[in-house]
Image (cartoon, rainbow, N blue to C red):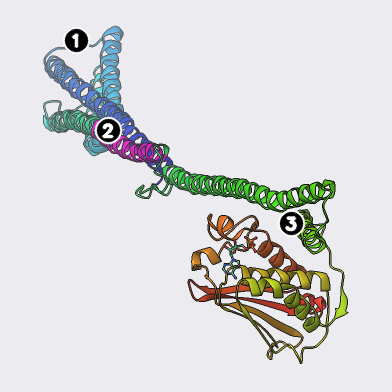
């Protein structure tokens, strides 16, 4: 459950408990008030009943005396006495009526009975008073029945009221006891629940926050693979952990990318430094030859002795060869910078690949002889004409053949070609040698610019690490590709796949 939900739930539970407590308090005080009112009524009614009983008794005594006097004497009642007697009866009647008002509900039946008997009695007594002075009036006032009846009803009502009062008092006690208990239980439950909820909430939040803190510390101390995966929360803390993990992933990838970029920048820097060293070496060798031979010839010209013409011509040839070597190197560098800036374009023409490859082999012949290598050519006779860039095609094979010869001593170099049966219009050309070979690892970077298979290659074989990079880029420009297979000490095989027309590549794409 989310932290927000847990907090809301806890708050609702505490509020409910609080409401129960307050409700119980109000209900208790209402019930107490009700019972107290009823109790007071019952007590007042019981007191009033006693008072009425006393008044009835007094009145009865007075009437019995008067009845006896009327029998024995001729004396009659004066108006004032009559009035006082009637007033006394009215007071009794009013008190009985007041008793009626206090006798609602369970004592109503007892009161009705009292009312009937007391009305009869009071009417009888009133009639006695009013007819007292009438000598013909006869009434047996000694008959105790009406009085006893009223008195009986009155004491019944009184008992009933006392019983009700006792009952109400009991209810009040029990209500107070019950509300006290509910209030105390509710109060302690609220405290207990609040404390329990607070404890769980705090320990849960603490644990989750500790895990988050541990995650950030571990990540901050360099453990980029650390992830927070043990937070059991679908809410805010879970979201926070997910956001942290997301951020960690992105940060780790970014750091990885930066390291990679830094490594490749370092590599590129190292490769360029090595390239500079190689290039300066490659430049210096032909330049030294040009300068050395030129000085030699210059001195020879100053010499008065006869010029050795064949030797002179041979030295001039060395100067020309070195100059061409220099030009080729500068051309390579220019080609690569053109490729890298995207300014290298194709100049398509129709040409015969066999002718160009054979010319490249012819140019290579003297070098082949100096390394004691044998050249074998096959499959070139039945090739179709290509519509592509002939200059680049020539350069690719010049590079491949020159490399094959450079890294092979006393071996074979084979050049073969064939159309690809499953891809009409595509031809593969293979230049294979039995030279030093390259490792699987080296195969993955020999096509990169300024790179040689080993740092010792330049010292042992010369070169700048540009030939294969240019060949690969030319192959791609021409719509084809170049691959290598090799085994250390056995030899290498470079395969060039070229379309007869670059449009075929676009159509295939
Ligand atoms: P360079 O030959 O001027 O050094 P390249 O780009 O032509 O530059 O070749 C890059 C590297 O690939 C070479 O230095 C060499 O280590 C390796 N390589 C190329 N061709 C061969 C081959 N036929 N046999 C063995 N190694 C080769």
Query: Nearer the observer, disc 3 or disc 1?
Result: 3
Residue identifier under label 3: 329
Query: Nearer the observer, disc 1 or disc 2?
Result: 2
Q: How far apart are marks 3 and 2 (CA)?
A: 92 Å
Is-magenta flag for residue 200?
A: yes
The residue at the point 30 percent across, 34 percent down is 198
Q: How many labels does the image show?
A: 3
| 335 or 156, nearer to the observer | 335
| In this picture, residue 139 sits left or right of residue 370 | left
Q: Distance between the residues labelled 3 and 1?
A: 172 Å
The residue at the point 64 percent across, 55 percent down is 450
Do tag 3 and tag 1 residues touch (Cβ < 8 Å)? no
Residue 410 position within the rendered picture, expressed as x and y whole percent measured from the top left: 56, 76
Label 1 packing within 10 angstroms: few (<14), some (14-19), many (20+): few
Q: In which quarter of the image is residue 124?
A: top left
Find numbered disc 2 in the image and state the secondary structure of the residue it sits on. helix
Label 3 or label 1, whichever comes before in sequence order: 1
Relative height, residue 180 to residue 322 (above, below):
above
Find numbered disc 3 in the image and state the secondary structure of the residue it sits on. helix
Mark 3 near ligand 1 (CB under 8 Å)? Answer: no
Determine which of the numbered discs, if any, sits on residue 190 in the image: 2
Find numbered disc 1 in the image and state the secondary structure of the residue it sits on. loop
Q: Quadrant of residue 331?
A: bottom right
Q: Which residues fall within the magenta stretch?
A: 191-219
Label 3 packing within 10 angstroms: few (<14), some (14-19), many (20+): some
Q: Judge whether residue 508 can be spotted in this image.
A: no
The residue at the point 31 percent across, 34 percent down is 202
Residue identifier under label 1: 75
Label 1 or label 2, whichever comes before in sequence order: 1
Q: Main secondary structure of the magenta part?
A: helix
């Amino acid at each position: 459950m989310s932290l927000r939900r847990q907090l809301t739930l806890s708050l609702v539970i505490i509020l409910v408990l609080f409401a129960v407590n307050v409700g119980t308090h109000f209900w208790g005080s209402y019930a107490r008030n009700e019972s107290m009112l009823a109790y007071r009524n019952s007590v007042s009614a019981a007191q009033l009943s006693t008072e009425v009983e006393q008044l009835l008794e007094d009145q009865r005594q007075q009437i019995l005396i008067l009845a006896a006097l009327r029998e024995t004497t001729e004396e009659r009642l004066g108006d004032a006495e009559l009035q006082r007697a009637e007033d006394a009866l009215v007071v009794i009647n009013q008190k009985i009526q007041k008793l009626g008002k206090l006798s609602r509900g369970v004592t109503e039946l007892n009161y009705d009975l009292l009312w009937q008997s007391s009305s009869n009695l009071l009417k009888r007594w009133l009639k006695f008073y009013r007819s007292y002075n009438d000598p013909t009036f006869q009434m047996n006032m000694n008959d105790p029945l009406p009085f006893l009846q009223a008195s009986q009803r009155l004491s019944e009502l009184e008992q009933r009221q006392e019983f009700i009062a006792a009952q109400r008092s009991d209810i009040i006690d029990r209500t107070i006891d019950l509300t006290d208990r509910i209030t105390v239980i509710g109060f302690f439950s609220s405290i207990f629940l609040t404390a329990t909820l607070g404890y769980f909430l705090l320990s849960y939040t603490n644990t989750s926050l500790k895990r988050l803190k541990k995650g950030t510390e571990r990540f901050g101390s360099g453990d980029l693979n650390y992830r927070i995966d043990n937070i059991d929360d679908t809410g805010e803390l879970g979201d926070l952990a997910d956001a942290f993990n997301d951020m960690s992933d992105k940060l780790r990838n970014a750091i990885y990318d930066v390291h990679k970029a830094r490594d490749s920048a370092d590599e590129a820097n190292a490769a360029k430094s090595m390239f500079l060293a190689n290039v300066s070496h490659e430049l210096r060798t032909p330049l030294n030859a040009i300068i050395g031979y030129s000085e030699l010839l210059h001195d020879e010209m100053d010499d008065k002795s006869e010029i050795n013409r064949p030797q002179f011509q041979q030295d001039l040839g060395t100067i020309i060869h070195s100059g061409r070597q220099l030009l080729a190197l500068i051309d390579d560098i220019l080609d690569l910078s053109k490729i890298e800036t995207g300014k290298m374009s194709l100049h398509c023409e129709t040409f015969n690949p066999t002718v160009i490859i054979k010319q490249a082999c012819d140019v290579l012949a003297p070098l082949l002889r100096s390394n004691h290598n044998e050249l074998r050519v096959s499959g070139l006779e039945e090739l179709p004409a290509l519509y592509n860039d002939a200059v680049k095609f020539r350069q690719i094979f010049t590079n491949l053949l020159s490399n094959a010869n450079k890294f092979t001593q006393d071996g074979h170099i084979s050049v073969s070609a064939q159309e690809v049966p499953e891809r009409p219009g595509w031809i593969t050309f293979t230049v294979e040698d039995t030279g030093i070979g390259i490792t699987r690892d080296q195969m993955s970077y020999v096509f990169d610019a300024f790179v040689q298979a080993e740092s010792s290659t330049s010292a042992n074989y010369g070169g700048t690490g540009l030939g294969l990079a240019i060949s690969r880029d030319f192959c791609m420009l021409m719509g084809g590709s170049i691959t290598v297979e090799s085994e250390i000490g056995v030899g290498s095989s470079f395969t060039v796949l070229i379309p007869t027309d670059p449009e075929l590549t676009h159509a295939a794409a």
